[in-house]
């Protein structure tokens, strides 16, 4: 008989007594493949935890979530009473059942356990919403303390102050609540109380002592954030008074608290703005890594997560550049990121891919600039971005040039289509400006478009790279892997991601599209009729799945101390994942065939 695994969230935060309750109440049920566990509108009596097998959450015929070993479902149904979706068994499943009454009891008694369910109810579920949660990162989020969120400093007025004084103080201090001192007590007066003042017909001269609420709803500064949120929810209030050793030290607004949990990234952005030294940027860079783990564990899709990471990385790089480069260089140059970072498709940190475009009239010499760029590359290394093995970094002469020199280089790349020229141009095509004078990058891209218009053979050579790697899909739909040291693997990048990305890059260059992100390129190409709409939609879904799968496998590798890579072991995938991977590679084959025909590349 299987034993309940208390190492998985949220059960890992239960007390010994609560664990005993769960162990006694847990029952095991078996469902064959195709069976329905929970129907829409059916009363939810249990929380289910998967021991083995796969269960799918279905919105009619669309799969919106997949549950595997140690995943639990359906917390929304437990809170609401029923689920709008159907839960069906994809692979025969063995499940733990925990009574609804027990789960509600634990929610009532354990604030951190309750936080897990509260957050789940609040989130929008997508197709990958129930992927395995990375335990340490989730615990960091769920066990955050009130002192980690900057509470608003309290504004005090005496009890004999009037309603008019309250209005003036709120406007002056830009707050929505005031603490009122009266007869050695402390009360609270909020913007909502103005409504009651008007309805009761009071004038502006009424003393606040008659209107304030002296039964304060408080939370300790060292309490859990989610406990504060549940306190607000329980009392139907929008703020609590934060106390330290019994004394009011702040007011925690619901909007600030919800922002912390729903958008942890805004805190990173604020810290970047306030940081005044390079060493202080190191922990901020580490927080970006933690954010990736948290959001991925909560079902954020790879394309959306990548764009968020691109934004935060861009802010990090720009802040570091501001701290390193003198103002005259910043004003006369453009710092750009390249490759997948430039496309907004890089999530996990790999290596540096960047360049610097220097204005022709920059007052600094190239020797002086080289010292600055070297310092910048060393700083990125400290942030967790190691040097690029291929040397694609602004600290190298080949990637730090004046506008005129860049224009000459672009001409050579287009008209002398050597292998390294094609590769370098592909990297630069995805350039995205993060700091400095962005018009300098536009000048280079304009030169590139002009050169392409006069080169008939360029696209034939450039697009041929799409056919460089075979798609690992056999005649009968089997996945083709390569065995080395007894381990059978396949390469997601070579087999699927690169052909899609590079084919879209070639089309974007041909039609002079300014977009650098592959998904954005797909959208515009379909809108302009350059790619068939159904193929574009299929490519979108296939690329999204491939990037998500690579991210998941990368996080698993990093979790055991191994480097993230593009290699995966098909045997470690679930049946559903393998089927989806086959479908994705089938789309890649169709897309490659379309590119081959479009650019007249000959046989596959």
Image: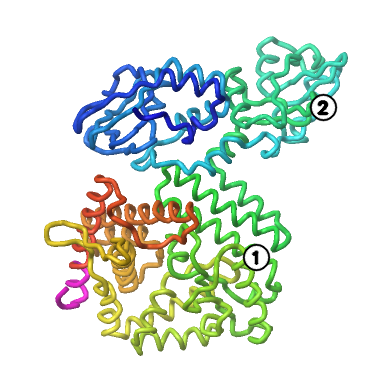
Q: Is residue 583 magenta?
A: no
Q: Residues within 10 Å of mark 1 (few under 14, many from 20)?
A: many
Residue 442 as seen in the image, left or right of residue 166:
left
**Label 2 residue SS:** strand
Q: Nearer the viewer, mark 2 or mark 1?
A: 1
Please name the residue shown 16% across and 62% down the image.
474
Q: Quadrant of residue 251?
A: top right
Residue 119 horizontal/vertical position (percent) = 49, 32
**Highlighted magenta segment, given as a residue range:** 594-604
Tag 1 residue: 320
Tag 2 residue: 156
Q: Is residue 602 magenta?
A: yes
Residue 213 horizontal/vertical position (percent) = 73, 15
Please name the residue shown 59% across and 27% down the image.
229
Q: For the C terminus, which image quadrant?
A: bottom left
How are the residues colored?
A: rainbow
Q: Nearest the camera: 379 or 21?
A: 21
The relative height of residue 39 versus residue 459 in the rendered view (above or below) is above
Q: Quadrant of residue 603?
A: bottom left
Cα separation between marks 2 and 1? 40 Å
């Amino acid at each position: 008989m299987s034993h309940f695994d208390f190492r998985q969230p949220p059960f890992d935060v239960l007390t010994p007594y609560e664990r005993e309750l769960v162990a006694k109440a847990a029952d095991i049920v078996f469902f064959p493949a195709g069976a329905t566990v929970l129907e829409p509108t059916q009363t939810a009596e249990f929380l289910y935890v998967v021991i083995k097998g796969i269960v799918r959450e279905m919105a009619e015929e669309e799969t919106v979530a997949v549950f595997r070993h140690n995943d639990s479902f359906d917390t929304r149904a437990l809170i609401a009473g029923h689920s709008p979706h159907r839960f069906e068994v994809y692979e025969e499943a063995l499940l733990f059942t925990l009574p609804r009454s027990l789960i509600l009891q634990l929610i009532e008694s354990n604030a951190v356990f309750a936080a897990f369910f509260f957050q789940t109810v609040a989130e929008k579920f997508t197709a990958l919403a129930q992927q395995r949660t990375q335990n340490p990162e989730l615990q960091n989020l769920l066990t955050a303390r009130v002192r980690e969120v900057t509470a608003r400093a309290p504004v005090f007025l005496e009890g004999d102050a009037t309603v008019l004084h309250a209005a003036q103080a709120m406007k002056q201090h830009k707050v929505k609540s005031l603490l009122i001192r009266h007869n050695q007590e402390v009360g609270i007066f909020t913007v909502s109380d103005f409504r009651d003042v008007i309805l009761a017909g009071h004038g502006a001269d009424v003393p606040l002592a008659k209107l304030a609420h002296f039964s304060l709803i408080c939370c300790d500064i060292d309490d859990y954030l989610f406990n504060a949120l549940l306190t607000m929810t329980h009392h139907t209030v929008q703020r609590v008074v934060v106390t330290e050793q019994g004394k009011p030290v702040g007011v925690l607004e619901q909007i600030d608290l919800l922002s912390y949990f729903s958008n942890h990234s805004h805190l990173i952005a604020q810290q970047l703005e306030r940081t005044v030294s390079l060493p202080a940027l190191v922990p901020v860079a580490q927080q970006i890594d933690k954010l990736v783990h948290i959001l991925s564990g909560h079902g954020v899709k790879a394309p959306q997560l990548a764009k968020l990471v691109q934004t935060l990385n861009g802010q990090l790089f720009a802040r570091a550049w501001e701290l390193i480069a003198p103002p005259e260089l910043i004003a006369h140059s453009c710092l750009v990121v390249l490759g997948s970072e430039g496309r907004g498709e890089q999530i996990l940190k790999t290596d540096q891919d960047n360049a610097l475009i220097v204005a022709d009239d920059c007052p600094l010499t190239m020797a002086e600039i080289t010292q600055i760029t070297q310092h910048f590359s060393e700083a990125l290394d400290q942030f967790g971005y190691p040097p690029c093995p291929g040397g694609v970094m602004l600290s190298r002469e080949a990637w730090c040039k004046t506008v005129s020199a860049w224009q000459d280089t672009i001409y050579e790349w287009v008209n002398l289509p050597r292998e390294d020229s094609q590769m370098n141009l592909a990297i630069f095509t995805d350039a995205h400006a993060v700091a400095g004078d962005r018009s300098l990058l536009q000048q280079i891209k304009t030169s590139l478009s002009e050169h392409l218009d006069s080169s008939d053979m360029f696209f034939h050579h450039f697009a041929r790279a799409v056919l460089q790697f075979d798609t690992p899909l056999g005649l009968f739909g089997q996945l083709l892997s390569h065995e080395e040291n007894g381990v059978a693997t396949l390469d997601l990048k070579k087999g699927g991601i690169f052909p899609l990305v590079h084919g879209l890059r070639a089309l974007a260059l041909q039609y002079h599209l300014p977009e650098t992100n592959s998904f954005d390129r797909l959208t515009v190409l379909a809108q302009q009729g350059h790619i068939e709409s159904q193929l574009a939609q299929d490519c979108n879904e296939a690329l999204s799945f491939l990037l998500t799968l690579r991210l998941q496998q990368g996080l698993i590798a990093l979790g055991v101390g191994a480097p993230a890579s593009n290699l995966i072991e098909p045997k470690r995938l679930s049946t559903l994942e393998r089927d989806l991977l086959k479908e994705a590679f089938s789309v890649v084959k169709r897309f490659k065939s379309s590119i081959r025909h479009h650019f007249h590349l000959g046989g596959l």
